[in-house]
Image (cartoon, rainbow, N blue to C red):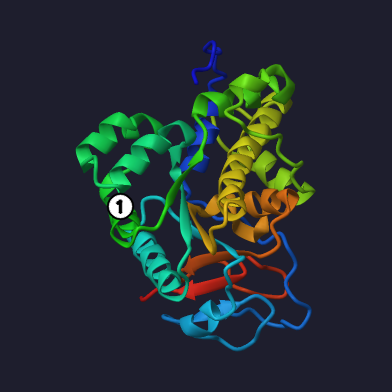
Amino acid sequence: MQLSRVLPVNPLVPLLLSLLMVGCAGLPGFIQGSEEMTEERCPAPGEWVVAGQHESITSAQLLAQINENSIVLLGERHKSREDHQWQLHLLAALNGRFDNMAVGYEMFVRDQQPQLDAWLAGELNDEELLEQSDWDRHWGMDFSLYAPLLRFNRLQRVPGEALNVPRELVRRIGQEGWQAVPREERYGLSQAAEPREEYREFLATMASHHGHEAASEEEVTAFIRSQGVWDRAMAEGLYSLQQRGYGPVAGIIGRGHMENRQGVPRQLADLGAESVWVLLPWREGEACMGPDTTPADALYGLPL
């Protein structure tokens, strides 16, 4: 489905949207950690630190807590090969425990599902997938970062789902508002739940810290609405997989859409998902678990 028209673009809005696409900047700790945690806890390489728990645990211990009704969000920095290797290992571990898992990908928009399905079935090669899905325009990252993840789906016959919607729709709803876009042009998307105040404040601050001039109130509002569209689209795609009988469902998504259980986890809760895990790789210098910070449900220490 094509959008009916092209809107004039406020020059600040695409810049801010592109900053979210890179998935590199972490959010400050918004959600309070357990009162039992009296000091900061950072994971050692190869170990997990879980929110509210003092003792580090192994991958086997963490995976034992995930069940077939779980939605597992695996956050990434889009350009980090290490992050993608970490995601791949977790997908393989989950697939070894469950027979009916599925994976959702932020990198593909809903209209590209036929092309993704054809590639997963071995009917398209890499070059044909990139061309027919218009990868460079819709995503633009180095495909070699994602190829091992997608080949996991193909080799193991694990379904892969296109989670995203076109940037044109994101921008249009951001600038004009939800009601201004006709139902038939929303790609089946439902309206996003309102963001929590702390997330709204973070996005407003992010909007104001970039560009040559401070963001106007209109630009901040458009930015927050745009982020809500992205978060809702991905949450709906993951929840749809679960409702169709798959489980657990894993999400390959930029970490900025899930840190501190904001963004996608917030939208999943609004949709009715009951078991959602936010898992993030951790490096020296990043936020740890503590009495005032809970960047994820669990952090994994990457090798030094």
Q: Position of residue 244 (x, y in %)?
A: 57, 51
Give the residue displayed 73% in from the left and 83% down from the top: 38
> Element type at marker 1?
helix
Q: Position of residue 201 (x, y in %)?
A: 73, 45
Q: Position of residue 85 (x, y in %)?
A: 34, 64
Q: Can the viewer see residue 212 in this picture?
A: no
Quadrant of the image containing the C terminus: bottom left
Q: Tag count in the figure?
A: 1
Residue 134: quadrant of the picture: top left
Name the residue nearer the viewer: 86 or 108.
Answer: 108
Q: Position of residue 129 (x, y in %)?
A: 28, 37
Give the residue displayed 33% in from the left and 62% down from the top: 156
Asked if 135 appears above or below 243 in the picture, the reply is: above
Q: Can the viewer see residue 204 in this picture?
A: yes
Give the residue displayed 65% in from the left and 75% down from the top: 51
Residue 33: quadrant of the picture: bottom right
Q: Is residue 271 left or right of residue 60?
A: right
Name the residue nearer the viewer: 37 or 103.
Answer: 103
Q: Is residue 282 left or right of residue 296?
A: left
Q: Which residue is mark 1?
A: 145
The residue most toward the bottom is: 55
Asked if 213 appears above or below 282 in the picture, the reply is: above
Circle 1: residue type? Leu
Name the residue nearer the viewer: 194 or 132.
Answer: 132
Q: Residues within 10 Å of mark 1 (few under 14, many from 20)?
A: some
